[in-house]
Image (tube, grey):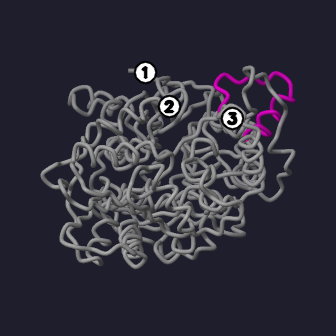
Amino acid sequence: MVTIRCSSVVSGLTDGVYSVSEADCLGKPTAREPGETELSEAVHHECGVAALYWLGKPAAKAGPASRLVSDANVTALMPSMLLDLQNRGQLAAGLSSYRGGRVQLLDTFKDVGTVGETFGMSDPDKHRAILARYAGCAAIGHTRYATCGRDDARHAQPFERHHGRLWKWFSFAFNGQLANYVELRDRLLARRHYHFTLNTDTEIIMHALAYRLRGDRPKPLREVMASLGRSFDGAYNLVFLDALGRMFVARDPLGFRPTSWSVQGRLFGAASESAALSNMGFTDIRTLEPGEMAIVEDGRLRIERFAACRRRAHCFFEWVYFAGVSSTLDGSSVYMARARSGERLAELEDQRMDDSCIVVPVPDTAKAAADAYAFRMGVPSVEGLIRNRYIGRTFIQPKTTRGQSAHSKYTPLEAVLGGRRVFLVDDSIVRSTTMRELAAQIRRRGGAKEVHVRVACPPIVAPCFYGIDMTTLGELFAPAFMPRRYDGTPSRQCLKRMAKALGVSSLRYLSVSDLGPCLQVDGEDLCTGCVTGRHPTKCGRWLMARARRAATAGGKASRTYE
């Protein structure tokens, strides 16, 4: 097990898109392999963050969550909280805790692996030893998904920076991605004696935080975040803890990623998803609004605004895929959003149904949509695919294992599928690796007569630059089939060509205009960059233009960042 107390890395924050120029997104050229297109070296991840604090005095009525705390130690609650965020990342996990009076006022424990593996939850003695060593009245935690450094504990979070001055000794974790990573890195390198060991946006954030915390007295945390927000372009949720016992939880001004918080008695909690709080026993769960931060200082909690929210850009993919189905994001239930998506697919259906038809969800994120679709169509929704639950989510796995996992992750049931017209419902098609394999297995091993694919999401036609691992046009399935002037609704001819490429009888998607009604979120408040090619930040738009140029030039398919 790797314990890292002093790391020279910090994870990326972002937003503040309003004063960034296109030149800021570019930065200076760096050395590359021959033939490599100038793209990214940044870590791209969709992660989960959490925070707990035992306040100086009660801030609300006591309840089930606050009664779990013994001797003001909140660390014991963090692993189970992170388990409820495991859907957001399976490659590494960790926590940092604060306890006044111990030598290591701020201490960090992290390693590669799932939450259970990292914290030794299958070994009671080991688990208790970890919790005892890192016991504290405040803790932050992280569960990580990433596409590089996946077997290196240096990339695990939280990241901790030691310093003799207590307000300069801090730890933090984040969920998101900096779109203007290159510009920020080159700006730091232009100063004297800066060095980067990991070349990620996480490292950039550490240096940016350290720079803003300089001086002979502690800086107000709101001012620190306000300064960061003016520099960053992109998506971020940040949890921060320093050796003075100060904590903050911040959400970028566009609100790309969700953040929930609650207070019960003396216990304050915050997490990427509401389920992590509700499962602990919190009841009055609130949304941290874009541009807001929850600050705990001197044992007291307050909510402050560090940046104006000029518009919102909630990532619709949170509802479609990443978030747990039991969570509520920005006031909208994930389960109900997926169910409404299935109902909308049924409204759009043009195939005639008969007694040979069955609906089969791709486990597990498509089940709510499939059940609602089947109910509206009057046909049974059955488990024709059995998922091996010991294999992780294929979309958030590294590319090298994705195809193999898609083959071994699902077992088609011939007794259910044989001779049937199968309407296979999935939440999305990104690269098509899984869908091609599933369609082939349902026909070959399952004996299905026809396979019709229904997708509870619009076609993914553009990269994401805000924290989801799809950052080049070449890796995506849909763009090759789309007309130059795509209006958000795929044509019949386009769908026929895509169905043929997938090897299925027919294919239908939702349209971009369906997202707002299905999610019950104003469509203008959603980031739809990956389904329209129109990104909500200046650097995102510039990177999209650059991705198009790289695809046209036929360069090596690497990241659109560096």
- Which residue does the image show at 72% across and 27% down from the upper left? 36
Q: Residues within 10 Å of mark 1 (few under 14, many from 20)?
A: few
Q: Quick one: 221 or 283, which is closer to the camera?
A: 283
Sequence-first disc among 2 and 1: 1
Task: Estimate the spatial distance between the alpha carbons at disc 3 and disc 2, rounded to whole Å.
Answer: 20 Å
Task: Estimate the spatial distance between the alpha carbons at disc 2 and disc 1, rounded to whole Å.
Answer: 10 Å
- Which residue does the image show at 59% across and 74% down from the upper left? 523
3 vs 2, front mark:
3
What residue is pinned by disc 3? 40
The amino acid pointed to by label 3 is: Ser
What residue is pinned by disc 2? 156
- Please provide percent x and percent y for residue 461: 60, 55
Instruction: Using the rendered view, name the quadrant where residue 525 is placed.
Output: bottom right
Q: Quick one: 412 or 462, which is closer to the camera?
A: 412
- Please provide percent x and percent y for residue 10: 61, 35
Sequence-first disc among 3 and 2: 3
| Residue stretch rendered in magenta on the structure | 181-200
